[in-house]
Amino acid sequence: MLFYPLNFHLRGKYTQLCNSTSILFVDRTVFFDMSSGQKATRLRETVVVLIILLLVGGLALAPGITVSQDQPPLPASYFGEVTVDGEPAEDGVEVTAKIDGEERGSIQVEEGSYGGPGTLEEKLTVDGEDGDNVEFFVESEPADTDPDSVEYESGVNKEVNLSVGEIPDDVDEVASVSGEVTDFEDDLVDDGTIELFDDDSSLATDDLSDGSYEFDALDPGAYTLEVTDVTDNEDAEVDVDLDAGEDAVENIQLDQEEVEDDDDTTGTGTGTGTTDDDDAEDDDEADDEVDDEAEDPDVVDDEQPITVEDVSETVDATEPDNSVRVETDVDADTAPDEDGVTMDTSEDLETVVDFTVDEEVASTDIDEYRDQGVRDTAAQSVQDQISEELADDDTNEITVSASSVARITTDDVAGDDGLSSVRMTADADDVDDPEQTGIFREADDSWEELETDVVDETDERIVFEAETDGNSLFTVADVNAEEDDDDEDPDEPDETDEFIPGFGVVVAVIAMITTAILSRYSLK
């Protein structure tokens, strides 16, 4: 009896192959027993069997299994012990993971732990981006973690032990509401109060010295938030509905306080003076006219798009936040190597950093508007125009936000062509994507998007620069357009570098066995 050794990681079994060829597995060596007269025939039969195994194994794995190499990142997995007031948490206690206040995963405690280290044991899976800070909560209570901080890492399987103090009874039944209050210029307020009402009953009051508020341990139901006594801002009321266990966020922006004209002229004796009643009637009529002019056009008629002319009328009816006249001074040119005269206005204005005019221009008037109504009207006007221009394209929605509006006018010496460039700023918080943000100019009853560059960017503000053909109304607008993906099948795999998982391993093993047998046979 002849045995042909073949190294293979099997041990302790003996079996028959093809009726007359025996295989003996001893420790890590495979021995093939073939009688001398049957070697060739049995070898061929063996090779045939291995080829069949190769084909069957491949076909069994192949149907419908194609995976793109461009896979989404794996979620992070967490497990660990949970203690409440020093004792193991009871079964059913909920553990939640959040990133930036948004819930990313939850799991319930069993036998004092959430999840487990085993491959088949359940875990708390969390989606995020590498470097995000992961926060853990036990029944909505912030938990202390061991390790002290948890940084998100895609695909990680990590033990994080949690501990909290005493959990309030019926924690799932209470709710909370919190948020920020901003003034008409979109800045956090630093005075005033916010009060929480249930029907007509005041439940709690919070001061707004830091621009934020929070009311917790609330029963589910309807409430009213009332903001009062914020300097130069109108009072505001906001209704909120809270569900059991909900942590609602309600940010509130206030409107600018309307200033009444108290300058009344009282007539005495004879002459052309007017009475207080006459003045009151005149003031009311004038206020009504201003209100009509300043009213948001898209509120007046939802069916009609807002035009540049509507924006211009709104600007005319609104008092500018900053207004300055700049005399052209060649000696003060901040860019002497460039054409024209560049004048720096960063110390006098908030949104217009500098501008360039022809040397023959004597002076330039600049009016800045930070009023939310003006900015919203300009944003809606740009949005309506772009939406109309892209009506035939595959876009789901166009959204525009305007961070600043300014009117720049040079003197009559150069006509309307005196201005050649302008730099304007936007608050970083008002800009979603600087690459999608540009300076728009009023031109021929429509908006012209100027070729805009980002010249400076910090955590607080972004500076944009654009060349222009002349004076006009300008706005910095952030434009976001979503492509229509209805025609794409999200389940359809990418047509790039497809492969069959596991098939390569089967092929490699069977090929190694076949090669070894052929090699041994050829040597004999």
Image (spheres, rainbow, N blue to C red):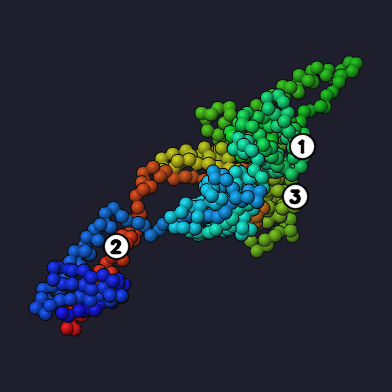
Q: Nearer the viewer, mark 3 or mark 2?
A: 2
Q: Residue 503 carries which label?
A: 2
> Earlier along the polypeptide chain: callout 1 or callout 3?
1
Q: What is the x, y in percent for residue 409? A: 67, 44
Asked if the residue under mark 2 is in contact with the one under mark 3, i.e. CB atoms within 8 Å, the reply is no
Q: Residue 192 carries which label?
A: 1
Camera sees residue 327? no
Q: Residue 257 carries which label?
A: none
> Earlier along the polypeptide chain: callout 3 or callout 2?
3
Q: How far apart are marks 1 and 2 (CA)?
A: 69 Å
Compared with residue 23, is residue 267 higher up or lower down, i.e. above or below? Answer: above
Q: What is the x, y in percent for residue 260? A: 77, 28
Q: What is the x, y in percent for residue 129? A: 53, 55
- Quadrant where the C terminus sits is bottom left
Q: What is the x, y in percent for residue 212? A: 70, 42
Horizontally, residue 13 falls left or right of residue 260, namely left
